[in-house]
Amino acid sequence: MAQIPYADISAPAVQPLVKRIAAERGSVLHLYQMLLHSVPLTEGWLGLLTAVRQKFSLDGAIRELVIMRVAVLNGAQYEADQHAPIALKEGITQAQIDALDDWRHSGLFDDLQRAALQLTDTMTRDVHVPGEQLDAVRRHLDDATTVELVATIAAYNMVSRFLEALGIHSGDTPVGPA
């Protein structure tokens, strides 16, 4: 259960954003119902996460793989629940999703995926990334896509920390129509 109540998405002050979120995301998920307590935060969040999810040149399978790993590392079940179907649509297999807890001992990941997962682990756990880890990614990606990968990992660490700090869960009952 969320630590504070979800925002009322029927409030007139948030209606323009509610309409935008519904148009861009298909519905107003629990995450956005919490974000809507702050209009400026919601606007900035939408801009950043829309860029990460829809405008980057980073391959969607790699994007979703690292998002799922961030969710595993941070214990962010809501994030995993939301992204597992997207990961499958992007070409990540259910077996790969299931192997994310112990990816190092799995033969299901190629060299780029392994480098991206190692980068995710280091960024999430240690923050500071050794040059050789970035080099391992750069063997497969150009500079722009490497920057997008790092930004994706960073952004979804922000998402999971927000979700977990506020106790946002898939089974919660938000306020108003979703």
Image (tube, rainbow, N blue to C red):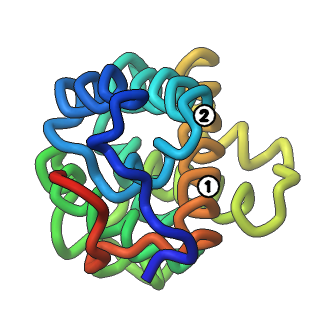
Neighbour class for label 2 at 10 Å: few (<14), some, many (≥20)? few
Q: Position of residue 169 (x, y in %)?
A: 38, 75
Residue type (three-letter) at the residue carrying disc 2: Leu
Name the residue at 47% across, 54% down: 34
The amino acid type of the residue labelled 1 equals: Asn
Quadrant position of residue 146: top right
131 relative to 110, above or below: above
Residue 11 visible in the displayed image: yes
Closer to us: mark 1 or mark 2? 2
Q: Which mark is residue 80?
A: none
Asked whether residue 59 is in view, the answer is no
Disc 1 element:
helix
Residue 85: x and y in percent read 16, 58
Q: Report the side of 107 relative to 38 (left or right).
A: left
Image coordinates of residue 23 in percent, x first then y, are: 17, 25
Q: Position of residue 134 (x, y in %)?
A: 72, 40
107 or 99, nearer to the observer: 99
Q: Is residue 95 above or below residue 16?
A: below
Residue marked by disc 1: 157
Rate crowding at label 1 as few (under 14), some (14 to 19) or many (20 or more) other CA atoms within 10 Å.
many
Under circle 2, the secondary element is helix
In the displayed image of the protein, which residue is found farthest to the front? Answer: 12
- Identify the residue shown where x is 12% and y is 47%: 89
Image quadrant assignment for residue 6: bottom left
Inter-mark Cα distance, 1 to 2: 16 Å
> Mark 2 or mark 1, which is nearer the start of the sequence?
2
Front in this rendered view, residue 135 or 37: 37
Q: Residue at x 31, y 27 (%)?
A: 15
Q: Which residue is mark 2?
A: 41
Up the image or down, 62 lies above or below 124; here it is above
Quadrant position of the N terminus in the picture: bottom left
Q: Nearer the viewer, residue 68 or 31?
A: 31
